[in-house]
């Protein structure tokens, strides 16, 4: 298990790399280029400059999250070939920088969705929350997008790029007749072109589950349970066509058995990256994010870590969304303090597992 921490880049992340370096057990930063528009090739100079910065702080840069997929690829439009070409060039450049894993998602229009970004908990902390009842009342997704943009408080959010949000209605119209099967076919088309390059470069693709893992606003979602994940793994049968196992995203559907999913796909060597966090499921369709501890949420974090241990997991791990605590002002879900506490907890569980089996 290689412990990492997400970093949005100097101009976009209030947390300096030097602070990340001080979290016990962290060896790498999970990076992105926030200022390259989705679909464009990532310039090698920018990748190398970022790598130099990260390495200069004593951290590795072996995981990228995310290289986002242009909507035309998901829609299967003729213009997708240009964007796939750009994606391939980006993979080659990331390989030159020593990157081993690329996390991406295949959610139409919206990336992760929450109904609230700062819900107060009894302990005085704030967390992100999701309530299907609130989401279902949204008749105009543009309104939700505008409100969320405001709530982000000046922080640019990946997957919520303003240039895309400005044309939501057009996007919704384009998706009108796209079925789950169409979306899967479009993912296959993409993977068939990209995975051979990944094999050549030894860079693994790791698809992130849909968050939350069910259809939203009438848009299809296909990365949401064991059965659909299996279908994706079979689209291109290669170890390089892999998974980012995000416990919070898969786990918000209580039908998803996390240790089972980890054992099943981990046993097939398809899990290359893990986001490990906890959430509290109030009812199916309503949840909020918590500290990483088992006692605070709905997941048995020991059983999750044990599943990773049992499959001999040697891939990259990072904590995921935490609470906003100790008066920190940062990106919703991405504060320093609670994620650092999460890491320490995950490392403790891991050490106990290792020693118990020694
Ligand atoms: Mn995640």
Image (tube, grey):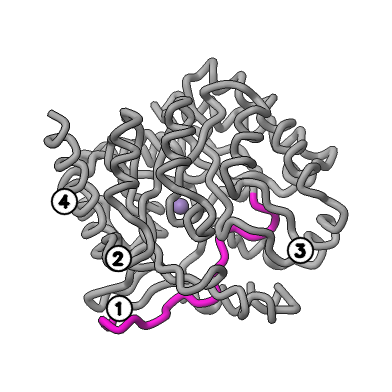
As for residue 51 lying within the magenta part, the answer is no
Q: Residues within 10 Å of mark 4 (few under 14, many from 20)?
A: few
Q: Can residue 256 be seen in this view?
A: yes
Q: Tell me if label 4 and label 3 are in contact, CB under 8 Å.
A: no
Q: Residues within 10 Å of mark 2 (few under 14, many from 20)?
A: many
Label 1 – label 3 distance at C-alpha: 33 Å
Residue 179, image x and y in percent? 81, 49
Q: Name the residue under label 2.
A: 291
Give the main secondary structure, helix, strand or loop, of the magenta stretch. Answer: loop
Of residues 244 and 51, the one nearer the viewer is 244
Q: Which of marks 4 and 1 is in front?
A: 1
Q: Nearer the viewer, mark 1 or mark 2?
A: 2
Residue 25, image x and y in percent? 18, 43
Q: Which mark is residue 125?
A: 1
Q: Mark 4 points at which residue?
A: 22
Q: What stretch is highlighted in magenta?
A: 107-124
Label 4 – label 3 distance at C-alpha: 44 Å
Residue drawn at 54 percent across, 78 percent down = 150
The mark that comes first in sequence, 1 or 3, is: 1
Q: Nearer the viewer, mark 1 or mark 3?
A: 3
Label 1 secondary element: loop
Q: How crowded is mark 1: few (under 14 residues within 10 Å), some or many (20 or more)?
A: some
Q: Is residue 57 visible?
A: no
């Amino acid at each position: 298990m290689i412990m990492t921490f997400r970093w949005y880049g100097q101009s976009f992340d209030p947390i300096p790399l030097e602070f990340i370096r001080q979290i016990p057990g962290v060896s790498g930063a999970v990076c992105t280029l926030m200022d390259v528009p989705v679909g464009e090739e990532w310039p090698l100079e920018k990748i190398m400059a970022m790598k130099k910065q990260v390495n200069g702080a004593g951290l590795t840069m072996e995981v990228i999250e995310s290289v986002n997929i242009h909507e035309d690829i998901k829609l299967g439009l003729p213009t997708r070939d240009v964007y796939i070409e750009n994606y391939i060039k980006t993979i080659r450049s990331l390989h030159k920088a020593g990157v081993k894993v690329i996390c991406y998602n295949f959610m139409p229009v919206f990336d992760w969705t929450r109904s609230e970004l700062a819900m107060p908990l009894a302990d005085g902390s704030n967390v992100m929350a999701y309530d299907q009842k609130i989401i279902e009342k949204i008749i105009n997704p543009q309104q939700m997008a505008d409100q969320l943009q405001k709530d982000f408080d000046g922080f640019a959010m990946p997957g919520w790029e303003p240039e895309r949000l400005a044309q939501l209605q057009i996007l919704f119209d384009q998706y009108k007749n796209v079925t789950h099967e169409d979306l899967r076919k479009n993912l296959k088309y993409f993977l068939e072109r990209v995975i051979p390059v990944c094999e050549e470069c030894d860079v693994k693709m790791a698809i992130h589950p849909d968050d939350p893992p069910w259809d939203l606003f009438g848009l299809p979602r296909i990365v949401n349970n064991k059965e659909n994940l299996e279908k994706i793994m079979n689209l291109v049968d290669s170890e390089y066509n892999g998974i980012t196992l995000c416990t919070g995203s898969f786990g918000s559907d209580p039908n998803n058995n996390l240790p089972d999913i980890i054992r099943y796909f981990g046993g097939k060597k398809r899990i290359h990256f893990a986001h490990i966090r906890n959430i509290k499921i109030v009812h199916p369709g309503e949840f909020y994010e918590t500290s990483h501890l088992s006692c605070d949420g709905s997941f048995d974090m020991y059983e999750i870590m044990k599943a990773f241990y049992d499959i001999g997991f040697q891939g990259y791990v990072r904590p995921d969304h935490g609470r906003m605590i100790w008066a920190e002002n940062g990106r919703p879900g991405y504060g320093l303090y609670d994620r650092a506490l999460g890491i320490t907890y995950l490392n403790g569980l891991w050490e106990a597992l290792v020693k118990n089996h020694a």
